[in-house]
Structures are given as structure tokens and as C-alpha cells.
Amino acid sequence: MHRRIVIITAVHAPSAHFLADAHTSLCAQELPPGWDWHWLIQEDGTTDRVAPHVPDDDRITFRQGRPGGPGVARTIALAHADGPYVKVLDADDQLAPGALARDLAALEADHALGWATSRVLDLLPDGSTAGFPGDPAHGPVERGEVLEHWAAHDYRAQVHPATLFVRRELLVALGGWMALPASEDTGLLLALNSVARGWFSSEVGLFYRKWEGQVTGQAAHVDTAERAARMAVVEARARALDHFAWRYPGGTDTG
């Protein structure tokens, strides 16, 4: 398998025009000698409105598929991941300088770690950024820490799933992203935290764009009944994984 970080991005027409900024942030990344990246952009649909915004770069592969939400699009793209690591990057977000190298260094240094996350700054419409309190300490995240924090804080995790950097084999073993209309990335984060230790970098790894069209800003995202159902299945999956005691790497439990 290539010494490659695979970037997976789900995109739909309203967010396609942000791909250029995401590409710029990728091109600014510096990786150790012998490593490269491959960007898999998967349209959640088969329109003619996304392809014109896909940057012209040999390191990019663009595909389309029937709509099913961002989790489905990312999981379909995962079939084509040709490297040992997968980094999620939403179409409207941007990586901070050095993000990929820091994620890679953390997991290459400790093969018992299954995933990494990093600090996030909101990218506001005027171009300014804003942070928020509550980040954990820089360093390892033990199994169960994210799940328990999330359950005790109105279903809000202390690390951001939009920054996930994951071992491909572990991501595949967990089935990719959850088949939910939203919170599919939170579901993956909690599943990862149930079976593997992770890493949090206190250096900013992502600029999370705030704009009118983002899915998390829509009324359906906070519908009470749907949100309760999403949170229930996300938690049930994570706790079931913990109950059955499957661990990454197999047989190791330091949490």
C-alpha cells in the first residue's frame, strides 16, 4: 500500500464552490519524505453542478453516486482509499498549516493509537476566526473519554469529528460512517473512542467554516425527535462496541 494519506470529502452542489479553498489548504501541507496525499472527492448525487468546481490536480479523484447523505458518500469513497491513513475534510472547511504532518507523526510514533483529532477554529463569514473553550489536554485520549464527556454534556464531544485522522484498517473494520441523516461523523468518533486510544493536538488543525447553507445550520438538524433518535443510536453503538470488548490493536487495553 502506498505511503499515502487519503483525504475523503463528501460534497453537494451548494458547497462545491468552497472546494478551491480546501484545495489551497491541502497544497500548503508539508509531509515527510516519501509520503504524499490523494484527495477523493465524492459527490452526494449525480448533478452537473459540482464537477466544474473540482480543482485540476492529478492528486484528486472525483466520483459521483446516488444521494444518501455525507456519511454514505464518504463510505463509498472509502472503497478507493489507497493508503494506510484516512483524513476527513468537509468541502467547506480548510486544513490549518501542518495539520497532516502532525496527525501522521502522532500515529506513526505510537501504533497503539487508532485515530487523531485536533483543535478547531470557526471560520466566520467575514474571514475572522473564533475558538471555544473546553479542549482537552494535548496528548492521548483514552478509551471511553469522549463517550462519557459527550453523554454528560448534551451530546457534545470535547474533540471535533471533522478533524478525524484514522487508520484505514480501523475505519473499514467499523464500517465507515454511520448511515444517519446527520451526526454520522460523531457516531464514527464515538465508535473509534470505544475501541481505540486516540490523540488530540492542541495546535489548530482545522478552520470550520460557518455559512448559511451548511447542513448543521438547517432546522432539520435540530429537530427534537430526530436528534433524540440520532443520539440514541450513536450512543447504543458505542456502548455495544465497548460491551463486546473488541479492541484496537487486538488484545491491548490501556484505558
Image (spheres, rainbow, N blue to C red):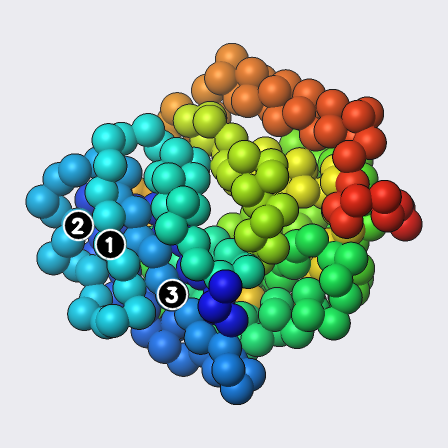
Upstream in sequence: badge 2 or badge 1: 2
Upstream in sequence: badge 1 or badge 3: 3
Q: Which residue is mark 2?
A: 50
Q: Is residue 156 left or right of residue 244?
A: left
User: What type is the residue that disc 3 sits on?
Assistant: His
What distance separates the C-alpha of mark 1 from that of mark 3?
Answer: 11 Å
Q: Which residue is mark 1?
A: 62
User: What type is the residue that disc 1 sits on?
Assistant: Phe
Residue 38 marker: 3
Q: Choose between 178 and 221: the one closer to the eye.
A: 178
Secondary element at tag 2: loop
| Residue drawn at (54%, 35%) of the image | 175
Extreme front residue here? 1
Q: Nearer the viewer, mark 3 or mark 2?
A: 3
Q: Nearer the viewer, mark 2 or mark 1?
A: 1
Secondary element at tag 3: strand
| Residue drawn at (78%, 57%) of the image | 112
In the image, residue 175 sits, relative to residue 11, either above or below, namely above
In the image, residue 119 sits, relative to residue 250, either above or below, namely below
